[in-house]
Each structure stands twice: as structure tokens, then as C-alpha cells.
């Protein structure tokens, strides 16, 4: 009968739809598993990379033949590599906490975002200088405040600026800006780096996601932007990424609720000039 045929057609369509959903789910799992495997290889490389200079530094120190200049240079190498490894371990620990649902207990105090910008510029200065980038800071004359955890907000901005430095060929330009937009705070980090395809933009904040590198770019582990997204959302904010395409640079925007009632505090002394910083 016609009714039976229609019912059969409807059942087949529903089954096809279900099979398609399952197929997409399997593809997503396979892709996630592949990204995890790539992450483990990169993690092993990132953890091994500092060992060679640390081993050389240890050999120099144990030889007993080093003069003061060599000792100072060796100590700087050790400090730099230990800092790098500590940063990796800290990110991995945060990642583990988030994965288990053990979200951090964030401070909730008035934060002067000019201080956040200055601290982020200071922390990323060695990377930016080593890659001969120019960091331009477009900041307001007066402080802008929001409620949150200053240390974690510095981590967020530093992570994105660091990514911009890594995914921009040497001699590039990175712009860090802060402004008020109505009842919101807008932070923008833009670069003229390798850019992102539409597919990469779609999964930019997924765990273990990484972009394609040009010959002069230097990638990361693919966990930083996932942590950024989590921390931004814990601050009741939003983060987004845009790019005109591969080779055309990228821009990341952070939006947070503005703190209208500004606390009475003395002006912060920035660690770096607030107008611009050039490597």
C-alpha cells in the first residue's frame, strides 16, 4: 500500500541519516586519535630538545675549566631551558586538570589590563627578539579594568602572542591592542604570519590542533589554544580567530565584561614601553 511504502521510505531515510551521523562520529574519533599521536611525538621532541644544551652545560660546569664568562653563559642556558621545560609541564598539568573537570580556582579581583599587556610583552620578548619580529602595542592612555585572575589573564595573552611569534616567519609584525567597546573589553592579537585555512579555523581551539607551518615558522604542541579557550570562558569571556587564508596572517580577539566601577589604585609602572616594542 501507499502508506506502507511511505513508512518504508521514511525508515530508510532515518537509517541513512543515522548511518551518516555515525560515520561522521567515527571520522571525528579517528582524526582526534591522529592528532593525539602527533601531539605525543611533538611532546617527546619538545621535552628532548632542551636536554642537549643542558647536558653540554652540565659537562662544562663539571669540567672545572670554565672562566667567569663561560659560567655566566652556561647558567643562562640552563635557566632558559629549565624555564622552557617548566612551561611545558605547567601546560600539561593544566590540561590534565581541565580534562578531569577539575577547573582551577581563579582569583576574582579588579585587574588592570594595561599591566596584563605589559607583562605579556615582557614574557614573550625573548621569543620575539630571537625571531626578529616587531611587536606593536596599541593601548589606551587610561587603564581598563575587568574582574578576574591577573596571572591567568597574562597566561592567556602570552600564549596567543607566543603562538603568533611561532607561526610568523622571521622578521614579521605582531600587533597587540586593547580597547573598550561599550560594556566590554576587547583585546586583539594580529600578525602577518602563515594564516589559517577555513578548516583550521574550524578546529583552532580543539585539543592537539596545529596549523601548517611554512619553512620559517615554528609550531607548538597544539594544547595552548585549548587552554586559552577554557581560561577565557572561566572569566565569562569569548575568544575567536579569523584569517583571510593561508599566508595572509591571523587575528585572535578576546572579549571580557568591562568593570565599570574603576578601583582607586596608583598607575602601574609597565615593565616595557606601552607604545611599541621592536626587536
Image (cartoon, rainbow, N blue to C red):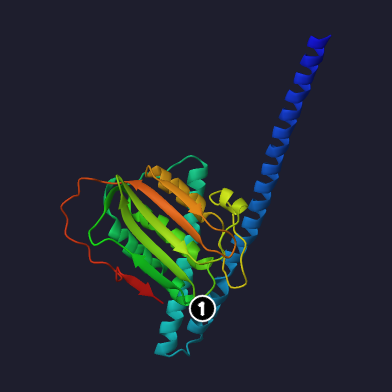
Could you tell me which secondary element the residue under label 1 belongs to? helix
Whether residue 27 sits left or right of residue 241 in the image: it is: right
Q: Which residue appears at 51% of the width and 78% of the height? A: 58
Which residue: 53% across, 54% down? Answer: 223
The answer to which quarter of the image holds residue 46 is bottom right
Quadrant, the C terminus: bottom left
Query: Does residue 86 appear in this view?
Result: no
Residue toward you, 2 or 271: 2
Q: Residue 234 vs residue 193: left or right?
A: left
Q: Which quarter of the figure has residue 40?
A: bottom right
**Foreground: 107 or 93?**
107
Name the residue at 45% across, 41% down: 102
Tell me the quadrant of the picture where the N terminus can be found. Answer: top right
Q: Check disc 1 and report the residue beneath it.
A: 58
Q: In this view, does 57 lie above or below 139?
A: below
Q: Residue 179: horizontal and vertical position, in percent?
A: 32, 55
Q: Position of residue 158 (x, y in %)?
A: 41, 61
The location of residue 230, given as percent across then percent down, is 46, 46
Residue 105's place in the image compared with 11, above or below, is below
Q: Compared to 3, does 61 lie above or below?
A: below
Above or below, 9 relative to 208: above
Q: For residue 19, say whether it is visible.
A: yes
What is the total number of numbered labels drawn onto the structure image?
1
Amino acid at each position: 500500500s501507499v502508506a506502507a511504502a511511505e513508512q518504508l521510505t521514511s525508515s530508510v531515510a532515518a537509517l541513512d541519516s543515522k548511518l551518516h551521523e555515525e560515520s561522521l562520529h567515527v571520522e571525528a574519533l579517528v582524526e582526534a586519535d591522529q592528532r593525539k599521536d602527533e601531539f605525543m611525538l611533538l611532546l617527546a621532541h619538545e621535552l628532548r630538545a632542551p636536554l642537549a644544551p643542558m647536558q653540554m652545560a652540565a659537562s662544562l660546569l663539571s669540567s672545572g675549566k670554565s672562566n667567569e664568562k663561560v659560567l655566566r653563559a652556561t647558567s643562562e642556558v640552563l635557566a632558559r631551558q629549565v624555564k622552557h621545560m617548566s612551561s611545558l609541564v605547567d601546560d600539561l598539568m593544566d590540561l590534565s586538570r581541565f580534562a578531569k573537570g577539575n577547573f582551577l580556582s581563579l582569583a576574582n579581583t579588579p585587574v588592570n589590563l594595561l599591566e596584563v599587556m605589559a607583562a605579556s610583552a615582557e614574557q614573550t620578548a625573548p621569543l620575539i627578539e630571537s625571531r626578529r619580529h616587531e611587536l606593536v602595542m596599541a593601548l589606551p592612555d587610561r587603564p581598563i579594568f575587568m574582574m578576574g585572575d591577573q596571572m591567568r589573564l597574562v597566561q592567556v595573552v602570552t600564549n596567543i602572542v607566543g603562538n603568533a611569534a611561532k607561526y610568523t616567519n622571521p622578521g614579521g609584525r605582531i600587533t597587540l591592542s586593547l580597547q573598550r567597546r561599550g560594556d566590554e573589553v576587547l583585546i586583539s592579537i594580529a600578525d602577518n604570519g602563515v594564516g589559517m585555512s577555513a578548516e583550521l579555523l574550524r578546529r583552532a581551539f580543539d585539543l592537539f590542533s596545529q596549523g601548517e607551518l611554512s619553512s620559517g615558522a615554528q609550531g607548538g604542541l597544539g594544547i595552548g589554544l585549548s587552554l586559552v579557550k577554557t581560561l577565557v570562558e572561566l572569566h565569562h569571556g569569548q575568544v575567536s580567530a579569523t584569517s583571510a587564508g593561508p599566508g595572509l596572517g591571523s587575528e585572535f580577539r578576546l572579549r571580557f565584561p568591562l568593570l565599570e566601577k574603576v578601583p582607586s589604585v596608583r598607575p602601574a609602572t609597565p615593565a616595557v614601553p606601552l607604545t611599541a616594542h621592536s626587536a
